[in-house]
Amino acid sequence: MPPERPDDTPPAVVPEKVLEEELALLYDEAPFGYLSTTPDGYIVRVNATLCTWLGLGADEVLGLHLTDLLTAGGRIYHETHYAPMVQMQGFVREIAVDIVRADGSRLPVLLNATLVRSPDGEPRLVRVAVFDATQRRAYERELVRTRDKQQAELRAQAAQVASATATVSQIIDAATSTLLVATDADMIVTHFNRGAELMLGHAAQDVVGRPSAGILGVGETLRQAEDLGVSPDSALIVAALVHHGRPRDWHVTTASGESRTMSLSFTEIRDEHRLIGYLCAGEDISVRLGLEAAQAAALQRELQSVARLQEADRMKDEVVSTISHELRTPIASIQGYGELLADGDLGELTPGQSGAVEKMLRNAARLSALVEDLLHLDRIGSAEEVPLHLAPHDLAALVVEARDSLAQLARSRDLTLDVQVPEEHVLVLSDAQALERVVLNLGDNAIKFTPDGGSVTLTVATTPAGCVLTVADTGIGMSEEDRDRVRGRFYRSSEAYRLAVPGTGLGLSVVEAIVAVHGGTLDIASTLGGGTAVTVVLPAYVPEA
């Protein structure tokens, strides 16, 4: 509070001349360039900062046209964009051009200009703020180089995966002496290899997508059911064959009417949690059974066939798992082995190899975060079917625990990470995992969008409105338009695209969904270039008396 003064004491008055001198000094010594031009672009005033950048005196600059300070490209941009925009909308923001110094060198700058009008609406002058963009330009170039490099690596990885998948598929189809028939869990045929076509006489296009019942013959299927002691239902028969485990002889009539004896085995195709299909694999053993004298040779062929079958079965399982399995399992595997490599558990790495492993882990973490965000949004969307596990949890302790994870994310960055929590408990009725995701997503966003040299602060407090979590950064911030739209799924701000900041646009959507189901609110305060503060308010937990 200002000190009180007696009513008879007049307020201090600063002479107008002193104020004018202070304003002139502030104008000249501003940390950015400043000039004023006539509406048609002739310079009528310039500050000392800009003169220093140009290496010219003020008397050398006054009277010049603004385009006299620009490169050839800048003059063209002035005529086609800058001048028309100033005249039409009365201002321009962050026009990137180069100005030419007295020694001929170039200085990258950003121009912000405002048209000043007289009381009767006539253009009077244009005020232009000039900002040194040297570091920003270099940073942008580095971001573009990094983005291009990462995209090239991702394309190479995608090509390797596609090549491996195609190779495995070709190997399976090239096994013409082995029958391989795969179905989904509903017994619909999903794969019918070349060996199956040759042995059974059916074309793959006539079988794939249709029920598997009848492919091996209705009569023979009934015989197998009787031998196994089950009812003649396709699902029950296959389950019994899988449980039996060993190959069984099937007497099959091909599409051409030829009778053959085939040794077939049936296995389940599973991911970690559920049955996704069945695989029937086998060989034609008609010749072996018909030639008793060649029994030993036939047995050897069978053993070789079983070995090939096991290898083909393994590769088939890998292909089906890659295509059908939830993404979390392969991503977790990539991360696990990547960490083993990074820690040197599998041998010493060269600096180049260490860098490659670090990039691999970073991209795997992004994929993992994307999968977890998508799954969490899906679970939140069906919250009635998947209830939250609510219990009192200390928000302050949770934020302190999350600090190590966030510090790990920022380990290669020049950032200050600060956590400010009260000593007393800040209890909220919440799902612990969901609340942890709120803290990590907000912290991750703040770290990603804050350039080196900045800071990220996580604060927990208790207010009459509830328990408050604030994540504030000194990063790139957002425009008002982006701030209004950033809550939407997959939305990314224009600054994020321009600076090539990696991300999916899902993190904030996940946070808002979690906060909503906890009965809380989320507020975003941000200005372009001025950082962002996200505030989450959750109802305080009050124990029953």
Image (cartoon, rainbow, N blue to C red):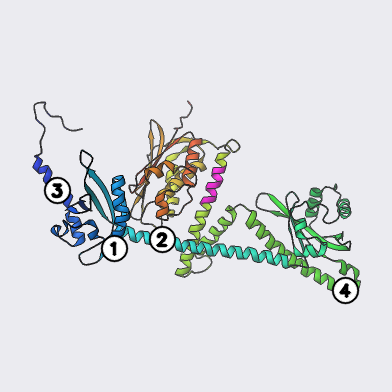
The residue sitting at 40% across, 31% down in the picture is 465
Which residue position is annotated with label 4? Answer: 294
Q: How many marks?
A: 4
**Mark earlier in primary sequence (3, 2):** 3
Residue that mark 2 sits on:
144
Callout 4: helix, strand or loop? helix
Vertical comparison of 167 with 362: above or below: below
Which amino acid type is shown beneath numbered disc 2?
A: Val
Q: Secondary structure at mark 3?
A: helix
Q: Amino acid at mark 1?
A: Ala
* Label 2 crowd bin: few (<14), some (14–19), many (20+), radius 10 Å: some
Cα gap from disc 4 to disc 3, whole angstroms: 109 Å
**Rendered view: 346 above or below 395:** below
Residue 458 visible, this orientation: no
Q: Nearer the viewer, residue 107 or 69?
A: 69
Disc 3 designates what residue? 24
Which stretch appears magenta?
369-378
Circles 3 and 2: CB atoms closer than 8 Å? no
Q: Position of residue 320 (x, y in %)?
A: 67, 57
Q: Give the alpha-carbon distance from disc 2 to disc 4, as whole Å.
A: 69 Å
